Amino acid sequence: MFKGSMTASVTPFKNGAVDEESLRRLVEFQIENGTDGIIPCGTTGESATLSHDEHHRVVEIVIDAVGKRIPVIAGSGSNNTAEAIRLTKHAYEAGADGVLMLSPYYNRPTQEGIYRHFKAVAEEVPIPIIIYNVPSRTGSNVLPETLARLSVIDNIVGVKEATGDLKQISSIINLCGDDFSVLSGDDFTLLPILAIGGRGVISVASNVIPADMAALVDAFEAGDLAEARRLHYKMWPLMKALFYETNPIPLKAALALMGKIEYEYRLPMCPPSDENYEKLKKVMTSYGLI
């Protein structure tokens, strides 16, 4: 079962290409600071702007750099079911421990279409699948009843829930049972999701503060709710700052300020406004990151 503090990793660029050296250093930074899993080629990894060859290569680099020390859950989502199968097969053959599959975007399938999409991939590739439900990006919501249908498929093992709707998330946990990992897909909701039975987070903020994010999960699991709350509110200003603009724009600026990656984007992503950049710097300075 996938659980704990897991990081949706950025894809660093240098001179327009994937920066392999920086990517490997980011992996080490995560492992050294207690992260429980790494997710390459998700939304935070700008998968939408990677070529197929780049997507494959980033997954392969991360698997190699991790060296089986923690799970690697490769992004393999698409609004084209055949393409999702192809990306998932590559992740399986490359040695990933699981995949994170975005619900089909733009074409906005019905709940039956969503069910058939994930079922088709699961039947084709024997790898654990975490469904990623983020209606703000996809234009459709994977409802609890659909997740309940999918949860009985052996290799569909969890959901990254980014609706922020605790009523919906409670329904998912209630309908899908203890063997189905419900993970926060929004850093703000990690603590409440843990409180209602969730298993952890696939995090943006843990790219820059992996130790604190992991410590929050550990504190909750140890029954130290006061410490979990303290960490939640300690991280709160930074979590907000990392969403001043569309993810991963502020995040890549933050990592560049920390000297971990080049300050480089790939269109249509671009640097943050000067105002938001200065606000981000203030929050990071206050946090002690720069």
Image (cartoon, rainbow, N blue to C red):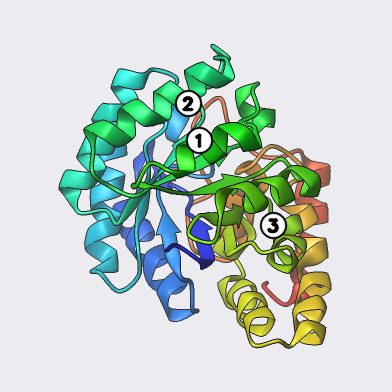
Q: Residue at coordinates 50% horizontally, 66% vertically from top-left? A: 3
Which image quarter holds the C terminus? bottom right
Q: What's the mark number on residue 161?
A: none
Q: Residue at coordinates 47% horizontally, 56% vertically from top-left? A: 261
Q: What's the mark number on residue 187?
A: 3
Is residue 259 or residue 190 the one in the foreground? 190
Residue 134 location (% of width, % of height): 63, 35
Which image quarter holds the N terminus? bottom left
Q: Secondary structure at mark 3?
A: helix
Amino acid beneath label 3: Asp
Q: Which residue is mark 2?
A: 115
Q: Which residue is mark 1?
A: 149
Going from N to C along the chain, the mark reached first, 3 or 1, is 1
Residue 16 location (% of width, % of height): 38, 35
Going from N to C along the chain, the mark reached first, 2 or 3, is 2
Residue 137 location (% of width, % of height): 63, 28
Check whether the beta carbons of the residues at disc 3 and disc 1 lie within 8 A of each other.
no
Check whether the beta carbons of the residues at disc 2 and disc 1 lie within 8 A of each other.
yes
